[in-house]
């Protein structure tokens, strides 16, 4: 095991996910899907919320490994990724309001003050070399865990998700409820039932107001981008 030293920031959007990021996600799904792990996305041409800096999602070098809020194994995995970051080419991990970065390799976990709390996923960034060369087999060799290279179901981009509002039902509503629960753990939890009722409407408006969006209770492209931004 070893700690990665250095950091390569993003410059511009490249058009899609890298093979290394897809490999890491593939391994993760094979290792942790049974425990509730899921694909929260790789490529997204966007800036980091609250800044003018291109997100590494825009270069396809960042993976969002979806985890159940509060899952103990998620913190264990985050620590393993850091402790083996040199072998895997992992240059940054953000989880549960904390960040580790190869810019400060020996500083350990530090407080993270970004817009998204990252309670429901591990945001993992790769160096360019790793983004081009990492394989699921290599991740399995380094981390173990039973990840066999599961197919990666790609979630729709924010602009391709349906616009939903009070009265809507279905998986997209459940996704918003789950994300809002992760963003605001100190507030009463929403039922993740796929029913966009008055409580979900109020929570969406609360989030929109705090994020500087139009407070209309409608989850359209702008609100989706902010909810999914990492």
Image (spheres, rainbow, N blue to C red):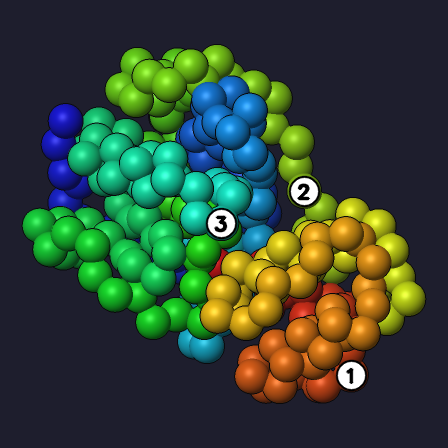
Q: Identify the mark nearer the N-term, 3 or 1.
A: 3
Q: Which mark is residue 138?
A: none
> Is disc 3 in contact with disc 1, using a CB cutoff of under 8 Å?
no
Q: Which residue is mark 1?
A: 216
Secondary structure under tag 3 reads loop
Residue behind mark 3: 69
Q: Which of the two marks, 3 or 1, is nearer to us in this view?
A: 3
Residue 2, picture quadrant: top left
Residue displayed at 35% across by 62% down: 97
Q: Horizontal and vertical percent for residue 26?
A: 51, 25
As measured in the structure, the alpha-carbon distance from the residue carrying label 3 to the one carrying label 1 is 27 Å
Q: Is residue 222 left or right of residue 111?
A: right
In space, the residues marked 2 and 3 are separated at their CA atoms by: 19 Å
List the residue tagged with mark 2.
Answer: 155
Q: Is residue 16 above or below residue 116?
A: above
Front position in the image: 156 or 80: 80
In the image, which is nearer the foreground, mark 2 or mark 3? 3
Judge left or right: residue 181 versus residue 116.
Answer: right
Q: CA distance from mark 1 to mark 2?
A: 25 Å
Q: Residues within 10 Å of mark 2 (few under 14, many from 20)?
A: some
Secondary structure of the residue carrying numbered label 1:
loop
Q: Nearer the viewer, mark 1 or mark 2?
A: 1
Q: Residue at x 66, y 31 (%)?
A: 153
Are the residues flagged by discs 2 and 3 in contact, CB closer than 8 Å?
no
Of 126 and 149, which appears nearest the observer? 149
- Residue lying farthest to the left in this orientation: 106
| 157 left or right of 18 in image | right
Judge the density around disc 3: few (<14), some (14-19), many (≥20) Cα neighbours within 10 Å: some
Residue 199 visible from this viewpoint: yes
Q: Residues within 10 Å of mark 1 (few under 14, many from 20)?
A: some
- Which image quadrant: the N terminus? top left
């Amino acid at each position: 095991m070893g700690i990665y030293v250095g950091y390569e920031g993003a410059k511009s959007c490249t058009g899609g996910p890298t093979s290394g990021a897809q490999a890491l996600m593939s391994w993760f799904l094979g290792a942790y899907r049974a425990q509730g792990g899921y694909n929260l996305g790789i490529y997204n041409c966007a800036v980091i919320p609250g800044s003018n800096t291109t997100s590494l999602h825009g270069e396809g070098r960042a993976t969002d490994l979806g985890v159940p809020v509060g899952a103990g194994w998620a913190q264990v995995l985050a620590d393993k990724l850091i402790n083996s970051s040199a072998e895997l080419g992992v240059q940054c991990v953000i989880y549960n309001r904390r960040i580790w970065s190869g810019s400060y390799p020996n500083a350990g976990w530090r407080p993270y003050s970004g817009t998204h709390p990252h309670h429901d996923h591990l945001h993992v960034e790769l160096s360019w070399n790793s983004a081009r060369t990492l394989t699921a087999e290599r991740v399995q060799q380094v981390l173990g865990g039973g990840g066999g290279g599961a197919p990666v179901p790609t979630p729709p981009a924010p602009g391709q998700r349906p616009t939903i509002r009070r009265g809507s039902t279905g998986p997209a509503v459940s996704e918003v409820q789950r994300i809002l629960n992760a963003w605001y753990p100190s507030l009463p939890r929403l039922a993740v039932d796929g029913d966009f009722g008055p409580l979900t409407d109020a929570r969406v408006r609360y989030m929109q107001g705090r994020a500087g969006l139009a407070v209309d209770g409608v989850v359209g492209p702008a609100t989706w981008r902010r909810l999914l931004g990492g």
